[in-house]
Amino acid sequence: MNTPIVTIRSLADHVGEQVTIQGWCYAKTAKGKLVFLQVRDGTGICQAVVFRGNVEETDFEAANAVTQESSLIVSGTVKADPRAPGIPGGYELDVRHVQLVSLAEPYPIQPKEHGVEFLMQHRHLWLRSSRQWAAMRVRAVIVRAIRNWLDDHGFLNVDTPIITPAAAEGTTTLFQIDYHGEPAYLAQTGQLYNEANIFAFGKVYCFGPTFRAEKSKTRRHLQEFWMVEPEIAFCNLEQLMEIEEQFVSYIVQRCLKECEPELKVLERDTTALQRVTPPFPRITYDQAVEMINAAAARGELVPGYPDPVPPLEWGDDFGSPHETYIAAQFDKPVFVHHYPTQVKAFYMEPEPDRPEVCRSVDLLAPEGYGEITGGSERISDAEKLIAAIQRHHLPMEPYEWYIDLRRYGSVVHSGFGLGVERTVAWICGLDHVRETIAFPRTLTTMRP
Ligand code: 4AD
Ligand code: MG
């Protein structure tokens, strides 16, 4: 039977037509003269109903022989039925022809619960499971939304190098490599190069993988993660926050619009996501410390944790319980700005009248997903920058070019980085970033 090959996602456009679907068997139930195949093709899952009376005997035998994950091609008539299971569901195939392409061996991943270690070892197969599939599809929409928003708002995509001679986000998380006898590092960020690029192009972004040898095992840290970093000339901290809230809201709203079936598979309660619209609340680090210490004094619990809010000394960085507590006080993502200069990167502009705090801002996602963006106004004066490099005990030579940017037409400028994996975790409601990227690199896993 020669019928058009269509995707499961497009079945609604083919009701009553004869079509062909190419895919894999997700599950099978056989009942006498009927075989129900759950077929997935990468765009969704649909039920293919094989009735013995409607197909050649050899095709019926093929349908009966199909094992989980066998590849197959089925043809038949598309029927609309609101009760039909699947993703998005509501359509099924009344089968006329079945072709078994390759019979799968007994499949190691079964509908029963497997431990995380087993699933991670089988990541190459686990990706086919519906929750993993859904998360990767949402990720792709997030990436598309990121690019679309920036491209539509005058940002030029200028990518930055992966192999770099100097640290940008602290020297403790560097992955060192051998660059023909000279030590070099995998990029922790593209920011410093982005700053050069704004002087040529005004508003830019880089988007690529970044690397951090994070020694701690947490739900939010990967060794290799993707970051989009917009950088803007003639932009101060307050203007930066306005850009960030527009950008993040757009990403969330695009996902709500385009990923309904995926978010349903993930059982994501989307009410909190619907509220993600500008403006976002803004608080200072000082205010956050007050809120944290007041809660600690009352013995208040951190949402989702068995423990009370730990007190925080002014000048220390937040731990994840602090971030979770602060975020839980708001019904939208919240900006925390003006962190202590001592806990932040060397390039952040200290507040002129109060240099112990800097013109930095982190955006904390609701529901305990933590910091999803980090950004700041950058030091724009050469002398101040040199002093900061010295204060951080960094070598001057690798930063000479970076200091140069302040010598030839320096301007107030700002930028931020948004971590794709944490954004995916938040939007999908996943509690660990290892499920937000196809092949995660964690402290304990780099295989497959
Ligand atoms: O706050 P970070 O370290 O900021 C920077 O790297 C700046 N240079 C960005 C800039 O201003 N252009 O990282 C930015 C974001 C974090 O908010 C978080 O979402 C993510 O990157 N991130 C990680 N995601 C997963 N695993 C890790 N180890 C991460 N480290 C940071
Ligand atoms: Mg940060």
Image (tube, grey):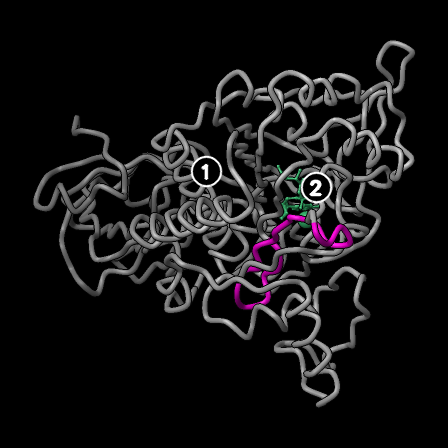
Q: Quadrant of the C terminus?
A: top right
User: Is 157 positioned to the left or the right of 400 in the image?
Assistant: left
Q: Is residue 386 above or below residue 63?
A: above
Residue at 45%, 38% in the rendered image: 143
- Residue 98, labelled with which disc? none
- Magenta residues? 353-371
User: Is 45 positioned to the left or the right of 376 in the image?
Assistant: left
Where is residue 343 shown, x and y percent of the image?
79, 52
- Taking the view exactly as shown, the residue that stands out farthest to the top is 180
Residue at 21%, 48% in the rendered image: 93
Viewer-side residue, 324 vs 357: 357
Location of mark 2 (residue): 348
Location of mark 1 (residue): 143
Q: Is residue 340 above or below residue 152?
A: below
Quadrant hosting ligand 1:
top right
Where is residue 152 shown, x and y percent of the image?
34, 31
What amino acid is at disc 2? Met
Residue 121 in magenta stretch: no
Q: How many marks?
A: 2
Where is residue 241 shown, x and y percent of the image?
50, 49
Residue at 26%, 49% in the rendered image: 48
Q: Quadrant of the N terminus?
A: top left
